Amino acid sequence: MPKKICTFMEHFPCQVVVFNTMCHTPSSAPESNKRCSSVLSRSLGIAVLLLGVFFFLPTHHQAQTKIYGINYGMGKTTQSLPDEEPVFVSPIGGDNEDFLQIGLDYMYAPRNTPIFFKSGLLYNARSSESTALDYLKAPVGIDIGLGNTFQFIFGANVYTSILLAHTGFDDQPDFIENKRRFQFGWGGNFGFGIDISEKVNFNLLYQRFFDITEMYSVETVNKEGSQTENFLGQDGFVRMGLQYRILNP
């Protein structure tokens, strides 16, 4: 059976070779043009998808990479009981108390992998108009970076923290007696990074921290008698980071 070149639009040939069953006669030109238009649309869609996948391919470092950085974050913090479900904490607005973070980052990426092992040292402040809790936090975790110049970043960590100081709790004897100096928790983050140069990266992340052990305990009395309530902290904030890479062949 003969073959024909199916075209659509006057000055833009589709250049798709089809069998006589697809472009049978001149009378079938409108239907053939629709088919060609559909083929072209699918081709363009696949091309865009492939470009997107290529753009966000994992960064496979050709050398071992050590990263040192600083970060600054601001957001909100709230308290919950152990049996309560985690809640979304917006980093802006709302009635929650304020959260502040200043920290140092250290990350290590093995050769030919998008995985970053991370640690660091963080100063955290949970504060309201009348009270403040200051912590020193040491997280350990993993980040995954997808992309080259522009990266999509997501990760998780566990942490231990030490209560450095507290302000405004002198009239709350329950807190003074039952506060916890050491805490454990976990967290997660997602966001993006962009390379400013070969060795310098800027990143912006939304980050969450969830206490596993209580901040403090309070004795409450009700009709059923007295009971102890343990309060945990949850933080939600936006952090900005500036990092410097050292490449080891």
Image: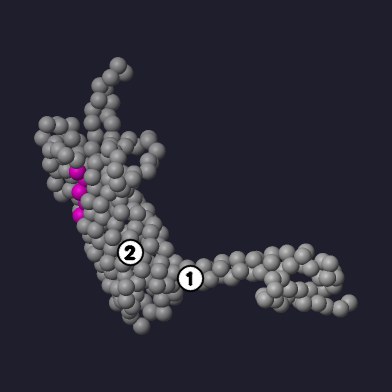
User: Which contiguous range is marked in magenta?
Assistant: 123-127
Q: Residues within 10 Å of mark 1 (few under 14, many from 20)?
A: some
Residue drawn at (31%, 48%), measured in percent from left and top? Answer: 91
Q: Main secondary structure of the magenta part?
A: strand
Q: Which amino acid is tagged 2?
A: Asn
In the image, residue 128 sits, relative to residue 246, either above or below, namely above
Label 1 to label 2: alpha-carbon separation: 17 Å
The residue located at (27%, 40%) in the rendering is 96
Residue 47 horizontal side relative to residue 90, left or right: right
> How many marks overall?
2
**Considering the numbered disc 2 on the image, is that residue within a helix, a strand or a loop?**
strand
Q: Which mark is residue 203?
A: 2
- Give the farthest residue toward the front: 10
User: Badge 1 is on which residue?
Assistant: 55
Q: Residue furthest right?
A: 1
Q: Nearer the viewer, residue 131 or 1?
A: 1
